[in-house]
């Protein structure tokens, strides 16, 4: 048993190391996380230190990426923006997973009317484009980082409900779950011991992708003025502020734009890579 | 085969011709399209406070007995001349002959009586009823003459009658002016596409500019793009000062830096502790760096002010040095008042000067030891919460009415300031018509308001106009919130 597990691990590891998408994605995501963590303990400057006389400077030893239209340090604001993005991603995906996966596995285990409600409910929420739902929610409850996170979390729920329901139903069709029931385990116990571990890889992949979607959505909401409120930095807000300064100083828009693009690209590549590395079906194909 | 070839060649030539035509040529020279940030809620200037109404219809569609010109001077309009009695209480106006309203009805003294009585009536919805406060009665002497009798001298009567709120309307059409305005101006109402534009067309077919479109584009970047693309010919007040620099370098556009009547202030709620304490209000005044705000929020466009008064007015007293930027002084005043860990909220309406100015002020107040929470609000919320509800600590707003220091003497105005000394000065002012005495009283009022540090006075809002080269006669300054296009032409 342990031999099998070890070989499985080693196999995954070697496949990961040979997977360029996974590597690039992991490095970009790692950098994002590193900058965000660093900003907790240290930033080059205070993020809200306005110095009008130093506005829109180019990169220098004092300001590595230059200063914005208020003379604030762009590198500092990007770092805190990264932290902000990660918080949004983690909490929003967390909300989506917690509620969505619970509903999904419940639907798969019980089928019948619960399944109907969960599936149709997901369809209804899905019918509204994610960003529109998020705008709706922030419009009702007011703009702000917390409401933006909740809004993005809510539109993550049906994504996870669907994915986990589909994957869980497949697992319920396999012999070992039947065997579990036959030896007297409850459905909840089978779900905990067999279904969840077996759909974990699918969920991890989905979570990575949703993380990227959440970062984009937060940037969009902040850009529209519904997300993080000034003076707290957020990448989307930085883009919005830069709009009218584009001609005078393009870096004000290019830098946060690049940060969003790299973070989303990194997470998407990581998600793709993880799917290839973790997905048992692909492995089966390869062995076959 | 030959025909096809010909066709193709013609099509190609036409295509090239279309591509080669510069955007300026595509715009025919008998129309004028102007870009605005705010859409008016309706089009009756005698029934609403929104400046966007006047910006559309003032002088173009509606006319008053007098009008205010580009420099803030009073000019005759529907009244061609007037005489004032020696005691300053009776004004007799001679009216213009042969004027008709856009619906064909004739204009005469009865319309003036109707309009002014309607504006100052008990149940009037006029937003500036104080303009007419001194009027005792308005009478038609004959169809071409109107006599206005005052209950007390009113030095500013002719100026007041030039406001958009005092325009002359007809009894036949007055009730419908909100949606289909009928006036006496050189342009009449054509249509209003909600959310997009108001179109006015010339009454006189000989006018060079036959139609004027007022387009409403809330977003400054979209305004700039529309101007560059030739969709609009002019922006009278660009909400993005940084973009002016680029337009200044562009030979296709003319940039005009004028001044407005907009005193931009950090307003404080004078009845909400700890802002009740004059030392706290003075500390805030010392904590802000006006020049940094003008530079950072307005790109250097704007003049620092020390009171609620426009620097270009003859009665202006320079009080900028009363509270110089001095963070240490601010901290000392706060300590003296016993305040520590002071936390205040700052509600910011949408304009650039407020949102950007607010971020800079928050940073400056933080340096002085005051933590500021910024709350961005939309205009509707601002009117509801700040202006009517006075539920706020601080806010930033530009007061664009001309000569409006009188708001400090009003009861329950939104900064909740109550000063018997100022009220006495304003009462004296209302009863004075001698210009020199009036200016001296206005100077006194400025000193009282600044002495009490009612609000922190920041800067006079600049008017940043950008228009296509060849457009002549646009206003540089904005003494009233008007877009008078009656003198505008293409060259």
Image: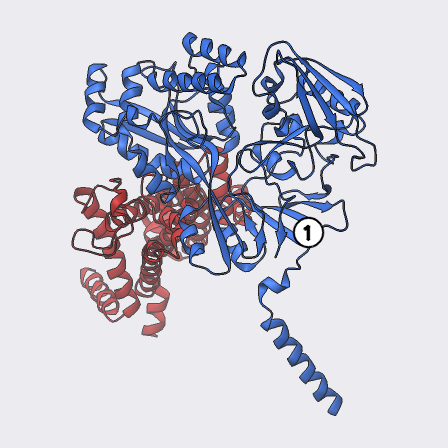
Chain colours: A red, B blue
Q: Which of the pair A251/B461 is nearer the observer?
A: B461
Crowding at label 1, few (<14), some or many (≥20) Cα neighbours within 10 Å? many
Question: Mark 1 — on which chain does it sit?
Answer: B
Residue B327, quarter of picture = top left
Task: Return the x and y of residue A62 as percentages of the image width and height.
Answer: 17, 51
Horizontal side of A29 relative to A173 (left or right) equals: left
Residue A198, quarter of picture = bottom left
Residue B322 visible from this viewpoint: yes
Horizontal side of B190 relative to A216 (left or right) equals: right
Horizontal side of B116 relative to A255 (left or right) equals: right
Q: Which of the pair B8/A165 is nearer the observer?
A: B8
Residue placed at 39% from the left, 39% from the top? B302
Indicate whether B404 appears above or below A72. Answer: above
Indicate whether B468 appears above or below A101. Answer: below
Q: Which of the pair A128/A276 is nearer the observer?
A: A128
In the rendered image, the quadrant that contains the C terminus of chain B is bottom right
Task: Return the x and y of residue B154 as percentages of the image width and height.
Answer: 58, 16
Q: Which of the pair B189/B437 is nearer the observer?
A: B437
Indicate whether B321 appears above or below B52. Answer: above
The mark tally for this picture is 1
Task: Return the x and y of residue B339 as percentages of the image width and height.
Answer: 23, 17
Residue that extends furthest to the front in the rendered view of this protein: B86
Residue B411 visible from this viewpoint: no
The residue tagged 1 is B209
In the rendered image, the quadrant that contains the N terminus of chain B is bottom right
Residue placed at 25% from the left, 56% from the top? A58
- At mark 1, the secondary structure is loop
Task: Return the x and y of residue B165 as percentages of the image width and height.
Answer: 63, 26
């Amino acid at each position: 048993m342990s031999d099998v597990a070890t070989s499985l691990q080693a196999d995954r590891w070697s496949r990961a190391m040979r997977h360029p998408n996974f590597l690039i994605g992991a490095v970009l995501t790692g950098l994002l996380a590193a900058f965000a963590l660093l900003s907790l303990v240290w930033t080059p400057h205070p993020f809200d230190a306005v110095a009008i006389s130093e506005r829109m400077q180019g990169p220098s030893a004092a300001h590595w990426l230059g200063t914005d239209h208020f003379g604030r340090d762009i590198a500092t604001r990007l770092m805190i923006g990264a932290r902000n993005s990660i918080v949004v991603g983690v909490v929003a995906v967390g909300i989506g997973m917690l509620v969505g996966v619970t509903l999904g596995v419940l639907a798969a285990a019980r089928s019948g009317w619960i399944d109907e409600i969960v599936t149709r409910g997901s369809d209804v929420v899905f019918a509204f484009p994610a960003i529109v739902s998020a705008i709706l929610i922030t419009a009702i409850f007011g703009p702000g980082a917390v409401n933006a996170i909740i809004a993005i979390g809510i539109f993550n729920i049906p994504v996870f409900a669907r994915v986990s329901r589909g994957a869980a139903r497949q697992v319920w069709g396999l012999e070992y779950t039947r065997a579990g029931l036959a030896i007297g385990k409850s459905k909840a116990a089978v779900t905990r011991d067999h279904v969840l571990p077996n759909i974990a890889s699918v969920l991890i992949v989905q979570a990575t992708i949703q993380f990227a979607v959440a970062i984009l959505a937060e940037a969009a909401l902040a850009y529209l003025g519904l997300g993080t409120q000034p003076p707290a930095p957020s990448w989307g807000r930085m883009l919005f502020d830069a709009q009218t300064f584009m001609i005078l100083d393009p870096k004000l828009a290019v830098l946060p734009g690049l940060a969003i693009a790299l973070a989303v690209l990194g997470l998407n590549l990581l998600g793709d890579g993880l799917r290839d590395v973790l997905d048992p079906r692909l492995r089966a194909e390869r062995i076959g | 085969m030959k025909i096809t070839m010909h066709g193709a060649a013609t099509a190609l030539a036409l295509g090239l011709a279309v591509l080669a035509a510069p955007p300026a040529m595509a715009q025919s020279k008998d129309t004028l399209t102007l870009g605005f940030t705010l859409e008016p809620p309706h089009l009756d200037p005698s029934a609403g406070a929104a400046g966007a109404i006047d910006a559309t219809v003032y002088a173009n569609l509606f006319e008053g007995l007098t009008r205010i010109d580009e420099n803030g001077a009073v000019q005759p309009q529907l009244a061609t001349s007037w005489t004032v009695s020696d005691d300053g209480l009776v004004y007799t106006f001679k009216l213009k002959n042969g004027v008709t309203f856009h619906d064909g009805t004739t204009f005469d003294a009865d319309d003036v009586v109707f309009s002014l009585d309607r504006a100052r009536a008990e149940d009037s919805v006029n937003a500036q009823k104080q303009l007419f406060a001194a009027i005792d009665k308005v009478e038609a002497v004959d169809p071409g003459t109107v006599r206005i009798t005052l209950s007390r001298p009113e030095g500013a009567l002719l100026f007041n009658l030039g406001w958009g709120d005092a325009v002359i309307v007809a009894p036949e059409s007055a009730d419908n002016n909100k949606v289909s305005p009928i006036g006496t101006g050189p342009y009449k109402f054509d249509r209003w596409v909600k959310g997009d534009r108001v179109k006015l067309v010339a009454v006189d077919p000989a006018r060079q500019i036959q139609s004027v479109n007022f387009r409403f584009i809330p977003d400054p970047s979209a305004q700039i793009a529309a101007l560059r693309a030739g969709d609009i010919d002019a922006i009278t007040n660009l909400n993005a000062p940084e973009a002016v620099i680029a337009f200044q370098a562009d030979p296709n556009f003319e940039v005009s830096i004028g001044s407005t009547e907009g005193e931009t202030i950090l307003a404080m709620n004078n009845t909400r502790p700890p802002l009740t304490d004059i030392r706290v209000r003075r500390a805030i005044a010392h904590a802000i760096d006006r020049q940094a705000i003008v530079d950072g929020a307005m790109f250097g466009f704007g003049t620092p002010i020390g009171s609620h008064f426009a620097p270009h007015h003859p009665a202006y007293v320079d009080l900028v040095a009363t509270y110089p930027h001095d963070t240490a002084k601010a901290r000392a005043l706060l300590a003296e008042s016993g305040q520590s860990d002071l936390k205040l909220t700052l509600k910011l309406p949408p304009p650039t000067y407020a949102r950007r100015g607010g971020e800079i002020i928050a940073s400056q107040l933080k340096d002085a030891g005051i933590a500021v929470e910024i709350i961005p609000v939309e205009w509707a919320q601002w009117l509801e919460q700040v202006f009517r509800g006075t539920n706020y600590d601080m806010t930033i707003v530009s007061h664009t009415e001309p000569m409006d220091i009188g708001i400090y003497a009003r009861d329950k105005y939104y900064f909740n300031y109550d000063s018997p000394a100022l009220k006495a000065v304003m009462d004296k002012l209302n009863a004075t018509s001698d210009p020199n005495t009036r200016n001296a009283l206005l100077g006194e009022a400025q000193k009282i308001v600044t002495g009490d540090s009612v609000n922190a006075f920041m800067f006079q809002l600049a008017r940043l106009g950008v228009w296509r080269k060849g457009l002549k006669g646009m206003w540089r300054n904005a003494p009233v919130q008007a877009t008078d296009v009656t003198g505008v032409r293409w060259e």
